[in-house]
C-alpha cells in the first residue's frame, strides 16, 4: 500500500510565498514522474507542475516563473515552492506520483492541501 501525504498549505496574502511538500511511503521500489495539480471551486483539476526522476520539469503557463518544483529521491518527496502568489492560485493542491511496487506500477494521489491567497 502506498500513501502520499501533502503538507504546507495555508492562508497567505497576495505576493507571498508558500512551500508545499508531499511525502510518499509504503512498499515503493521507485518513483518515476511526480507532480502537483490543483482544483479550484467549480473548476476541473489542472496540472501545475511535473518532474521526472531525472529532474526534468514542466510547468503550466500560469505558474511559470513563480513556482518551482523539486524532489528528493532519497526521501520519496516532492516539493512545490510557490512565490508571487495571486488570488487565482487559490485551490486545493494535490500531489501525484507514478509509483513502482513489486509486480506493478500505478499513479497514486494525495488527499490535497488547501492554499488560499487573499487579495
Image (cartoon, grey):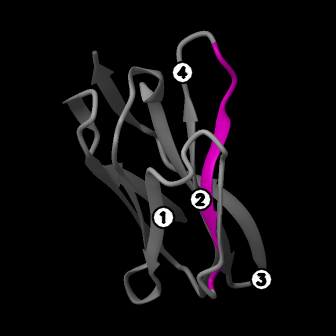
Vertical placement of residue 27 versus 109, above or below:
below
Horizontal side of residue 22 vs 55, given as left or right: left
Q: Are marks 4 and 2 in contact (CB under 8 Å)?
A: no
Residue 101 coordinates in the image, percent (x, y): 66, 79
| Circle 2: element type | strand
The residue that label 4 is drawn on is 40
Lower position in the chain sequence, tag 4 or tag 1: 4
**Mark 2 neighbour density, 10 Å: few (under 14) some (14–19) many (20 or more):** many
The residue that label 3 is drawn on is 103
Residue 89 coordinates in the image, percent (x, y): 45, 30
The residue that label 2 is drawn on is 35
**Magenta span of residues:** 43-53
The quadrant of the image that shows the C terminus is: top left
Magenta span contains residue 44: yes
The residue that label 1 is drawn on is 69
For marks 1 and 2, give the one nearer the viewer: 1
Magenta span contains residue 39: no
Measured in 3D between alpha carbons, the distance from the residue under mark 4 to the one under mark 1, in whole angstroms, is 20 Å
For marks 3 and 4, give the one nearer the viewer: 4
Measured in 3D between alpha carbons, the distance from the residue under mark 1 to the one under mark 3, in whole angstroms, is 29 Å
In the image, 72 versus 106, the foreground residue is 72
Amino acid at each position: 500500500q502506498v500513501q502520499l501525504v501533502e503538507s504546507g498549505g495555508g492562508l497567505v496574502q497576495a505576493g507571498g510565498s508558500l512551500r508545499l511538500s508531499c511525502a510518499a511511503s509504503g512498499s515503493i521500489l521507485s518513483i518515476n514522474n511526480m507532480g502537483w495539480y490543483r482544483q479550484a471551486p467549480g473548476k476541473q483539476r489542472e496540472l501545475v507542475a511535473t518532474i521526472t526522476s531525472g529532474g526534468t520539469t514542466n510547468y503550466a503557463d500560469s505558474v511559470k516563473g513563480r513556482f518551482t518544483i523539486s524532489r528528493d529521491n532519497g526521501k520519496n518527496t516532492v516539493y512545490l515552492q510557490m512565490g508571487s502568489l495571486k488570488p487565482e492560485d487559490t485551490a486545493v493542491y494535490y500531489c501525484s506520483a507514478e509509483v513502482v511496487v513489486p509486480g506493478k506500477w500505478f499513479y497514486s494521489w494525495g488527499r490535497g492541501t488547501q492554499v488560499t491567497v487573499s487579495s
